[in-house]
């Protein structure tokens, strides 16, 4: 789906937060790319050619291992990268698909590996990022068990809102069904209830955030923990 007009490129937090010397070595190797919706940036078990530092939009980490339909288990935006498995010399263990279109700075996997080999500081920094992904995945699993469908939807809307910088989230019922792994009827019911509280407004192919603070209060412990731990682990906020 396309991002709203407010979906501006603000820079990738990992690039902005790394040591200046590492960033200076990395920048000349980067190529700007437009990431179209539904484009797969990596596939499970397949060696990808490029690493992506996301600048805008949202990429879904999809698990397809034991079910026929994909399920979103994590998201990546301007706080992270797609292709983190290359840091550990591993093949991707899940699919990564662009959910909301945006832009990224990318470089070849082999160039990325050479930079990591020449800079233990950069390697350590990016390994910390992998730890933030593990935190996000574990908290998503906790929410899947403990939170209601409505709370899970509110949590995901907040996570998307964080990453695209716009109150208008271009999400369809089909998108949200994949994101939560529930039937579309359940999504429709949850959206109607969140609309009744005036926290969101839903139109065809679009969810508008009207009261972010209300959504945060409603989510309770299911939103904010991963975000706080990202800041703690990386030493800066996304």
Image (cartoon, helix red, strand yellow):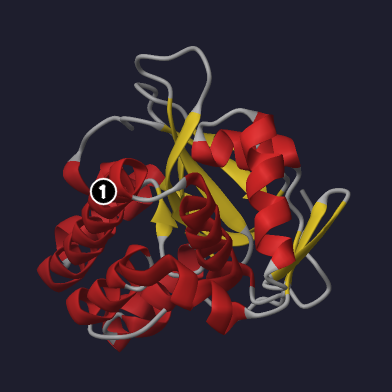
Residue at (59%, 79%) from the top-left corner? 212
Residue at (42%, 77%) from the top-left corner? 13
Question: Which of the pair 107/87 is nearer the observer?
Answer: 87
Which quadrant would residue 90 be assigned to in this image? top left
Residue at (71%, 42%) from the top-left corner? 188
User: Which image quadrant: the C terminus?
Assistant: bottom left
Total number of numbered labels?
Answer: 1
Q: As displayed, is residue 81 above or below residue 166?
A: above
Query: For mark 1, what is the residue?
Result: 142
x%, y% of residue 76? Answer: 46, 56
x%, y% of residue 52? Answer: 48, 54
Question: Which of the pair 1/217 is nearer the observer?
Answer: 217
Q: Name the secondary structure under disc 1.
A: helix
Which quadrant would residue 110 be assigned to in this image? top left
x%, y% of residue 169? Answer: 72, 62
Tell me: 193 left or right of 41.
Answer: right
Question: Which of the pair 154/229 is nearer the observer?
Answer: 154
Residue at (51%, 32%) from the top-left corner? 181
Q: As displayed, is residue 176 above or below residue 63?
A: below
Any part of residue 224 in sight: yes
């Amino acid at each position: 789906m396309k991002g709203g007009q407010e979906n501006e490129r603000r820079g990738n937090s990992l690039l902005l937060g790394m040591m200046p010397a590492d960033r200076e070595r990395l920048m000349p190797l980067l190529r700007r790319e437009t990431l179209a919706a539904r484009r797969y940036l990596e596939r499970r078990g397949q060696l990808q050619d490029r690493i992506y530092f996301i600048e805008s939009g949202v990429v879904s980490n999809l698990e397809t291992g034991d079910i026929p339909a994909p399920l979103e288990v994590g998201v990546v935006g301007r706080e992270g990268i797609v292709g983190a498995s290359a840091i550990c010399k591993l093949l991707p263990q899940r699919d990564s698909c662009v959910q909301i279109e945006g832009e990224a700075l990318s470089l070849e996997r082999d160039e990325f590996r050479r930079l990591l080999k020449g800079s233990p500081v950069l390697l350590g920094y990016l390994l910390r990022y992998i730890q933030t992904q593990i935190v996000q995945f574990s908290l998503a699993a906790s929410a899947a068990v403990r939170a209601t469908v409505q709370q899970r939807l509110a949590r995901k809307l907040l996570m998307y809102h964080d990453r695209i910088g716009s109150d208008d989230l271009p999400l369809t019922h089909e998108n949200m069904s994949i994101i939560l792994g529930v039937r579309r009827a359940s999504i429709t019911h949850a959206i109607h209830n969140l609309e009744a509280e005036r926290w969101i407004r839903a139109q065809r192919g679009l969810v508008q955030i009207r009261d972010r603070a209300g959504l945060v209060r409603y989510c309770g412990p299911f939103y904010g923990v991963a975000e706080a731990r990202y800041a703690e682990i990386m030493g800066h906020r996304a």
